[in-house]
Amino acid sequence: MRALLLIFIPSVLILLSGCSAKVSTDYNANVDFSQYKTFQFAEPGKSSIVSLDKARLEDTIKRELRYKGLQPVLTADSKADITVNPYIREMTDFDSYGTSVGFGVGYGYSSIAYSAPVRFREYTYGKLIVELIDNKTNKVIWRSISRRQLTESMTPTARDNFIQEQVSEMFTQYPPGQGG
């Protein structure tokens, strides 16, 4: 029985960690999303995206919104119902490396321990963020943030796959209240 629990509990924990959300989405619950039929992208300058990733991001968002029934406004003279503001926020974090060696002596519940210091290196990554702005009120009505990291070490194919997967996940529950 104990052996079964030692296998079952870690398996359940691994399964649950795999089911955690890859994106975080927020929206204005007072908005009727069925009123939106057309979209346009934010003007250049309002968006801070590296050019190659910007094209990948916009193409994927355009596909997802078309799938949801929204149509892009193609002329600059026309005003769409919503403006899509996608961007990649540059973030930094630390990664530890090196060997950590520990020594310890203990008796009962007391112990003495020593551990060699671990080295840290700073790295940058990108967080995908997509905002939908109501053009009548000029307010954000929907926002989704990727919980995963877009790194510079990714190949072009991996970057493209990452963006497609994350944007698809973002729009899974759009419009809000209608499920997937």
Image (cartoon, rainbow, N blue to C red):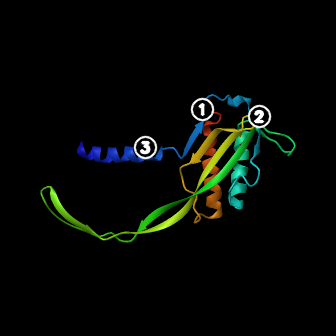
Which residue was labeled with disc 3? 16
Give above or below for 3 relative to 150: above
Query: Looking at the picture, how far across and down is residue 23, in whole percent?
Result: 55, 45
Query: Looking at the picture, how far across and down is residue 13, in whole percent?
Result: 38, 45
Q: Which residue is more in the foreground, 38 or 22?
A: 38
Q: Is residue 140 left or right of residue 41?
A: left
Within the image, what quadrant is residue 143 found in?
Answer: top right
Q: Is residue 44 left or right of residue 126?
A: right
Between the C-alphas of marks 2 and 3, the distance is: 37 Å
| Residue at point 73%, 51% (across, down) | 59
Which residue was labeled with disc 1? 179
Find residue 37 and name its label.
2
Circle 3: is it few (<14), some (14-19), or many (20+) Cα within 10 Å?
Answer: few
Circle 2: is it few (<14), some (14-19), or many (20+) Cα within 10 Å?
Answer: some
| Residue at point 85%, 46% (across, down) | 76
What quarter of the picture does the C terminus occupy?
top right
Q: Nearer the viewer, mark 2 or mark 3?
A: 2
Looking at marks 1 and 3 on the same chain, the residue that comes earlier in the sequence is marked by 3
